[in-house]
């Protein structure tokens, strides 16, 4: 095979296995022999620790298994990468998925890295958030002729559709979002208030900040939970992370889940951890009461903790007022997407094995908290 048809997958510098393109364009994977003896299954359902060549059966991820597709950027990062490729005289249509993973290299979300790494883009330089917001806005509305190298290094490997950067601030690793042209001017403040409300609801969320701006109410930032920094070593430790879409090999661009499915996935992956199940129940209630309908399969993730050999739900993210073009929750609640209510919420919780009284109490807590924190946002949106 050609060199760009093969790629090494690594975890903290240790070889995990090899990715190779097949004649049909699918990316086959085989574990390294030492990883088989000492490692863990990087995707528990799709890639168990076995000595065999795994080939994807679905093509939702451009020929990749979901675990590797999670390393690739989504809409915003793809826009940056494709324009940077063109700037370098490369037709994006000729760059295969393994070459794109090679460009991601060690800069992707989670802990997996890819070798050999192909470098595109230079140093990001100093950061002016208002200037970056303007650059992102121009990127989305027209051809951008500014410093693509720096913009890509800051945000080219990020997921999601909205402009964002990933950077180090005050010794921590942060993701900072900028409003898209279709967002309200107070989008940053709104997401910050939603995150504060979610925390008050008992939902596990990352550390958040509202970064100041000269031109708006501020930019929403969240501390990256796939990076940990210790007191002794300042270098971040990378945590292996998988979205629900990747774990279940789901077409994340289509409604494909019910909260029953997420509860079952959480129970299986975490060994029935009560804390994780209750956290997911609260998140489901929050999404319903706070009108966050963009609850699709990439907005739920799990972190692998190597020391304890355990999976747990990641902190909640992408919590804000949102709707969908069809007006329903992307993840249905007991089969209901348009107007789920207490009956559906309780049905999901009880089927997952949570006591009805406990579900009722958590649901009431979340509903009252949302009303107290977010009533102004919700009534303002409903009156439009």
Image (tube, grey):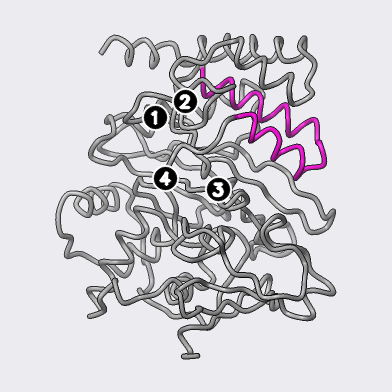
| Residue underneath mark 1 | 189
In the rendered structure, which disc, 1 or 3, sits on the residue that comes first in sequence? 1
User: Foreground mark, 1 or 3?
Assistant: 3
Q: Residue 255 carries which label?
A: none
- Pick the front one: 80 or 127: 80
- Cα separation between marks 1 and 4: 27 Å
Tell me which numbered mark, 2 or 3, is placed earlier along the sequence.
2
Q: Are marks 2 and 1 in contact (CB under 8 Å)?
A: yes
Question: In the image, is residue 374 part of the stretch drawn in magenta?
Answer: no
The residue tagged 3 is: 245
Mark drawn on residue 253 = 4
- Quick one: label 2 or label 4, which is nearer the N terminus? 2
Mark 3–mark 4 CB contact (< 8 Å) = no
Q: Specify the quadrant that holds the C terminus.
A: top left
State the residue at coordinates (28%, 29%).
Answer: 184
Residue at x 68%, y 41% (from the top left corner): 313
As helix, strand or loop, the secondary structure at mark 4 comes to loop
- Which residue sits at x=58%, y=74%? 28
Q: Which of marks 3 and 4 is nearer the N terminus?
A: 3
Residue 201 x/y as whole percent: 62, 20
Q: Depth-wise, is mark 2 or mark 4 nearer the camera? A: 4
Observer-nearest of 183 and 253: 253
Residue on which the image places disc 2:
193
Residue 270, picture quadrant: top right
Q: What element carries label 3?
A: helix
Can you tell which quarter of the image residue 358 is in? top right
Q: Position of residue 8 (x, y in %)?
A: 59, 80
Classed neighbour count for the residue bearing mark 1: other residues with Cα under 10 Å, few (<14), some (14–19), many (≥20): some
Q: Is residue 285 magenta?
A: yes
- Magenta region, residue range: 259-288
């Amino acid at each position: 095979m050609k060199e760009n048809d093969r790629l090494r997958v690594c975890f903290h510098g240790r070889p995990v296995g090899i990715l190779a393109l097949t004649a049909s364009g699918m990316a086959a994977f085989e574990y390294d022999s030492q990883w088989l003896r000492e490692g863990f299954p990087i995707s528990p359902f799709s890639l168990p620790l076995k000595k065999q060549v795994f080939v994807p059966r679905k093509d939702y991820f451009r020929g990749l298994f979901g675990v590797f597709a999670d390393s690739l950027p989504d809409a915003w990062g793809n826009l940056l990468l494709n324009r940077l490729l063109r700037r370098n005289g490369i037709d994006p249509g000729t760059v295969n998925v393994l070459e794109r993973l090679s460009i991601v290299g060690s800069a992707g979300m989670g802990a997996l890295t890819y070798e050999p790494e192909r470098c595109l883009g230079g140093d990001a330089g100093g950061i002016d958030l208002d200037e970056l917001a303007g650059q992102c806005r121009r990127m989305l509305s027209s051809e951008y002729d500014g410093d693509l190298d720096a913009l890509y290094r800051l945000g080219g490997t990020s997921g999601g559709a909205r402009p964002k950067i990933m950077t180090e601030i005050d010794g921590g690793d942060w993701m900072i979002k900028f409003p898209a042209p279709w967002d309200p001017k107070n989008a940053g403040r709104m997401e910050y208030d939603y995150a504060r409300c979610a925390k008050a609801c008992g939902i596990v969320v990352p550390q958040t900040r509202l970064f100041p701006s000269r031109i708006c109410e501020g930019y929403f930032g969240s501390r990256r939970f796939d990076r940990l920094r210790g007191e002794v070593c300042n270098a971040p430790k990378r945590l292996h992370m998988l979205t629900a879409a990747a774990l279940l090999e789901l077409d994340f661009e289509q409604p494909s889940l019910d909260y029953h499915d997420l509860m079952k996935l959480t129970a299986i992956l975490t060994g029935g951890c009560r804390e994780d199940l209750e956290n997911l129940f609260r998140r489901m209630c929050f999404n319903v009461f706070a009108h966050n309908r963009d609850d699709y399969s990439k907005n739920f993730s799990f972190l692998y903790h190597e020391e304890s050999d355990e999976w747990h739900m990641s902190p909640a993210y992408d919590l804000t007022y949102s709707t969908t073009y069809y007006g329903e929750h992307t993840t249905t609640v007991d089969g209901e997407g348009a107007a789920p209510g207490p009956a559906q919420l309780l049905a999901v919780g009880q089927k997952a094995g949570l006591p009805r009284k406990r579900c009722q109490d958590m649901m009431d807590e979340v509903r009252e908290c949302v009303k107290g924190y977010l009533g102004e946002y919700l009534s303002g949106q409903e009156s439009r």
